[in-house]
Amino acid sequence: MRRGLLFLLVFVLLLIAPTAVRYLQHYQLGGVNRAEPPTYDVASVVESVPTPAAAAFVDAPESFGGLVLLDQSHDNAFTLDEIGYLDGRLAARGVEMMGYTGGDLATALRGVNAFVVITPLQPFSADEIQAVENFVQRGGRLLMLGDPTRYNVIVEEDLFSFNIFVESDKIPLNSLANSFDLIFNGDYLYNTIENEGNFRNIVLDSVGFTENALTAELDQVVLYGAHSLQVGAGAKALMAGDDNTWSSATDRPGGLTLAATAANGNVLAVGDIQFLMEPYYTVLDNARFIAQIADFLSEPIRRDFTVADFPYFFADEIDLVYTGAPELGPDAFDEIITLQASLRGAEKALTLATADSQSGDAIYLGLYNQSDEVADLLAEAGITLLIDPEILTEAETAVLENENANSDDGADAEEEAIDNENDAAADEEPVAEESFDRLIQSSLGNVHMSGTALILLDESGSERRLVVLAASKEGLENTVSRLLDLIPLDADYALADCLLQDNLALCPTNVTNEEVEAELLTGGTLEADSGDGDVSEDEDTAVDTEEEPTDDEEQPEPTDIDAIDQGTIGLGETVEGTLGDGEQFSWTFQDGPAVIDIILESGEDLDAVLELYDADNIFLAAADSGFTGEGETISGYEIEDDASYTILVRDFYADGGSFTLSVQESSEPSTDGDSGSEEGDAGSSDTTIFLFVDDDGTPIDSGFTSQTELETLLSPNYTVQTWVSSADGPLPEDALEGIDLLIWDSGDYLDSEGFFGEDTFVIFAYLDAGGSVFITGSSPTIFGDLGLSELSDLEFTGEDAVLLEGFTAGEIIELGATYEVIFADFLVDDLEPGSIAFLLRGANSDDSGNVVGLAAIDDTNDDQQTMFLLMPFAALPEQVQGQLLDNMMAWFGF
C-alpha cells in the first residue's frame, strides 16, 4: 500500500515538475535574468528588389479610323478596366472597340479591321471558328491573349455534397488557336535568376525577339504570369524566354515561346493579359509594345472581301453612278437619299456621279439593257449578258421607225413578183415562233434575267466597284433594299436566298413575271428630243386640258386591279384596316364631283403605296414618297363626275401592315386644273417666294449669287423671304412650310458634297409634298459635280408662248462674259413630253445646243413644277432679266 502511494506521489511530481519549472523561469523566481531577444535587421538578411524603370516612350500615333471587334460572348475572364490602356491606344488612332456579345460572328466581322479574343472560358463553335478563319484568310487581324491565372471554376451541388472543381488544365482559347497552328500550354513560366520582383514575372530581352514591326525598338518587356505557346509549321515565335526561364509543366528551362504570330502575320498570340493592366504597362518597354499591338489592330489593310461584306469594303467616299445615264426623277432621289442616309450610319459618304466623272470606289446601279458602262467589269468576271433580240428604248424605236418611213420602199415589178412568190411560199410553210434569250451567263451557270438581280464586286484595280443590275426598276429597288439590310453589323444575313460565289451574287428580285425593261424610268423631269437641242412643235406647258389623243397615239391601258374589295368610302369618311402578306385593298369612291385629299396613315411596319384609278381602271395618280411607317397623301385631286373611282392601298414590299385611310375635301387647288402656263396677273403680295441663297460651296470664278437681282425684281409684286446659307446656317425643317415657290440660287458656287447636306433633305421633303422650285446657278447643288464648260451666249428655243413672251425662237443673247457652268448633257438625251427647253447654249459656247433653261411638270407627284436655269440668273443681261423672270413666274401660275 505504501509502495503504491509512493509511486503515485512520484508520478504526480513528475507530472507537475515541467509546469513548475516554466512558471519559475517565466516570473524569474530565484533564477537568472531572461536574455534579451535578438535584433532582426531585414536589410542585412533580405536583398531589396528595385522597381523597374519605365522606358521613355511617348505614343504619337497616326489616325487610321475603323472598328475592332472585342469578343465578350465566351464567358471571357477579364474586365474592360483591365484593357483600358489598350483601348486608349486604339482610340488615339481613331479606332473604336466594339463588343461582340453573340449572334452571327461572320456578319459581325464584315466591317472591322481586327478581332480580339481574351481569356475565353467557353470554346468557340465550328461555325465561329470557320468565320474567324475566313476573316483572317481575307486579311483581317486576330489578337489572342491567354493567362494561366484565368480559368473556369465549376460548382456542383446536390442534396448530399458540395464540390468545387478548378479547370486549370483546360484552355478553351485553344479551340480557336489550334486553327492557326498555335497552342496555349496549361502551364505558367518562372525565372528565379532574372525577374521583375517575382519569379513568375518574366523579363524578356531583345535577344529573344524576332524582327517584326511588333518588336521594333523594344529592349525589354515584362509578362506577368504567362503561358508558354507551342508553335506549329504555320506560325512563328515572336518572343522567347532565356535559358533561365522554366515551365511549370515540364520543370525544364529554355526554348519557351511567350508570344507568336501566324497566318502571314495576321494573327498575334500572347500568353499574358496582365502586362496590359495598370501599373504593369508602365514597366520597361511594355507601353511601346502595347502601342505597337494597337498599330497591328488598326493599320489599314488590303482585305479580300465578298459581296456579303457590303458596304465595308468601300473607302469613306463612294460615287453613285446610274448606268445608261437615265434621267433622275423623284423615285431616284428617294433611292439616293435612302442609300446616303444608310451609308452615313456606316461612316461612308455617297456622291452622285456620272460614268465619265467617276473616280475612286463606286456603286453602279442600272438595268441589264443599259449596262454598257460596266461591260468591261462584267467581262473581267467572266459574265455575259445575252439579250436577243435586242430591246429598244422608246427613243430608239422612234428613230428606227423614222428611218424605215423615209427609206426608199419602191421596187420594180420583177422584185415585187419575186417577193410575192416568196410570200406565197412562206404562207404554205409553218412560221417558227420567235425565241427570246434573256440570260446571265457566268461561272454560276445560265440564269434568266427575269426575276434575278446581279451583284458583282470588282477588286481588280486600286478601287472597289459594286455593280448592281436587275431586269426592271422594281427589281433594282428591291435589290438595293436587300443591300441596305446588310449594313448593320448585327443584321440578319440578307443574302441567304442568293446564289453566291465570293465576289458574285445572283439574287431573286421577288418580282412576279418580271419584264426585262428597256430603260430605267424614275418619274423624272426630262425626256429625249431629236438630239439637236430643238424641242418638238407640239410641246406645251399646259396640263390642265387633256388633248384628245390622235389615232396614232397609244391609248392608256386599263389596269387589272387584283385587290380585295372593301366596299365604298365617302367624302369625309375614315376607315382602318390591316393588310396581310401580299394583300391589296380597294375602295370605291362615288361622291364626285369634288376636289379631294386622299390621306393614308401607315402603321410602323407598312411601306404604303396609295393609288387612284378612274371608272375604267385607268391609272390617275399615286403617292409613294415615304418610307416604312410614314404616311402617303394624294392632295387636291379633282374628281370631275360621280362615276365609280377606285382607291387602292398596298405595301411596297407586300409584307402588309396596319393603316388608316380617309377622304377629305381639299383646301388646295385642283391638280387637274390650270398649271399656270397661261398668262395671269403680274403677281400678288399674297404669294410668298422663299429665296434660298446657297453660297456654302467653293467659288468657281469670283464667287457671286443672284440674290440682289432676284430680290429687286420680285419684291414689288411678291412677298420674298431670303435665307443666305453662309450667314443663316442650315435650313430649319419648317423653313419651307406655307411658301408658294422656292428659288434655289447657288450662284457661282460649287458644292460637290452639298447634295447630302441638311439643306437638301429639307428641300426634298418640300418637293415630295408637291412644292414648286426654280433652280439656278453655275453648278446647282442638286447635280453634284458633273463637270463644267464655257458659256458665252444663249439661244431661245421652242414655241411656248408663256416662256418666250417678248422673245423669239432662235434669238441669240450675248452674255457680258464667259462663265464656267455645268454641262448637263443628259438633259439633251432625255426630255419627257411636257418638258420644255426654252434656252440653249449658243453657237459660240462650248457644247453648243445643250439645254440651259428647262421647265418640267412631274405628273407622278401632283403635277409638281420644276424649272432649271443652268447658269447664274445674275449673268443674264439686265434687259433680259426682268422679262424672262416675269415669264417664269407666269409659267408657275403667279
Image (cartoon, grey):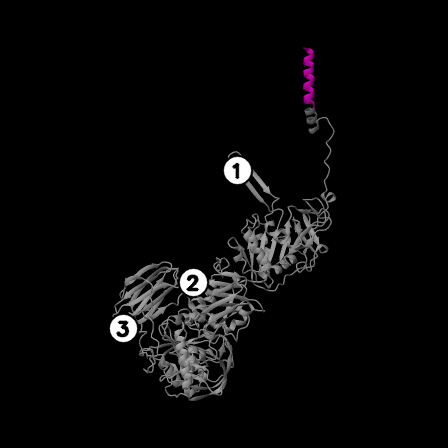
User: What distance separates the C-alpha of mark 1 from that of mark 2?
Assistant: 55 Å
In the rendered image, residue 3 lying in the magenta stretch gets the answer yes
Label ID, residue 640: 3
Total label count?
3
Q: Disc 1 on helix, strand or loop?
A: strand
Residue at disc 2, secondary structure: loop
**Residue 449 position (above or below residue 271):** below
For residue 440, say whether it is visible: yes
| Left or right side of 388 for 862 | left
Q: Mark 1 points at which residue?
A: 157
Q: Counting residues from the N terminus, which is met first, the one under dot 1 or under dot 2? A: 1
Tag 1–tag 2 contact (CB < 8 Å): no
Report how far apart the C-alphas of labels 3 and 1 lie in the structure.
83 Å
Q: Earlier in the sequence, mark 3 or mark 1?
A: 1
Looking at the picture, how far across and down is residue 88, in whole percent?
Answer: 58, 58
Which residue matches tag 2? 510
Q: Nearer the viewer, residue 485 or 754?
A: 485
What's the magenta bit mostly, secondary-structure-wise?
A: helix
Q: How crowded is mark 3: few (under 14 residues within 10 Å), some or many (20 or more)?
A: few
Q: In which quarter of the image is the N terminus?
A: top right
**In the image, residue 818 lies in the stretch drawn in magenta:** no
Q: In which quarter of the image is residue 54?
A: bottom right
Q: Which amino acid does label 2 sit on?
A: Asn
The answer to which of 263 and 382 lies nearer the viewer is 382
Mark 2 → mark 3, Cα distance in angstroms: 38 Å
> Where in the figure is residue 332, as x and y percent of width and height?
44, 70
> Label 3 is placed on what type of residue?
Glu
Which region of the structure is painted magenta?
Answer: 1-17
